[in-house]
Image: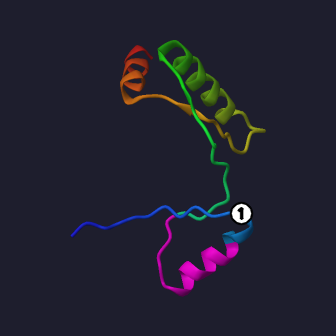
Amino acid sequence: MGEKSFEVITDPHHFEAVKKALADAKVDTVLAEVTSVPQNTIKLEEKAAEQMLKLMEVLDEHDDVQKVHANFDISDEVMEKVAAAG
């Protein structure tokens, strides 16, 4: 029987209480963090997707950058084309 996983999203003000409730219920967590979640996403086509992925890579590798958040959406089909071209 395969393992099930769930994603729990809560208001940042309730984070610690939810984290404690899961621990008290002996629910194992893989990752618990406060992060930014976009309210809407922007669909990117091939050229824009390629440019955005390059920008994200540069930002991610910069020593002064700790985290990068984005709201873009790249389809699997476009992602495959970009990966094949790169």
Residue 32, by quadrant, is bottom right
Pick out the residue farthest to the front. Answer: 40
Residue 38 in the image, given as x and y percentages of width and height:
63, 43
Task: Please check the rendered image and state whether residue 70 is part of the magenta-colored stretch, yes or no.
Answer: no
Q: Quadrant of the C terminus?
A: top left
Left or right: 30 in relation to 63: left
Q: Secondary structure at mark 1?
A: helix
| Spot occupied by residue 34 in the image (x, y as percentages of width and height) | 67, 59
What kind of secondary structure does the magenta stretch mostly adopt?
helix
User: Split into 4 quadrants, where in the image is the N terminus?
Assistant: bottom left
Which coloring applies here? Answer: rainbow
Image position of 25 (left or right of 38) = left
Q: Residue at x 52, y 18 (%)?
A: 50
What amino acid type is highlighted by mark number 1?
Pro
Residue at the far left: name it. Answer: 1
Comparing 35 with 66, the one in front is: 35
Q: How many marks?
A: 1
Nearest the eye: 66 or 19: 19
Other residues around mark 1 within 10 Å, as few (<14) / some (14–19) / many (≥20): few
Please give the name of the residue rendered at 47% of the width and 75% of the height, measured from the top-left corner.
28
Q: Is residue 71 left or right of residue 45?
A: right
Residue furthest to the bottom: 24
Depth check: give the residue in front, 29 or 78: 78
Q: Position of residue 54 (x, y in %)?
A: 59, 22
Q: Name above or below for residue 56 compared with residue 46.
A: below
Residue in the image at 74% along x and 39% along y: 65
List x then y, in percent, for residue 71: 61, 35
In the current view of this chain or complex, which residue is farthest to the right?
64
Would you say residue 19 sits in the magenta stretch? Answer: yes
Q: Please state the extent of the stretch shown in magenta in the rendering.
A: 16-30
The residue that label 1 is drawn on is: 12
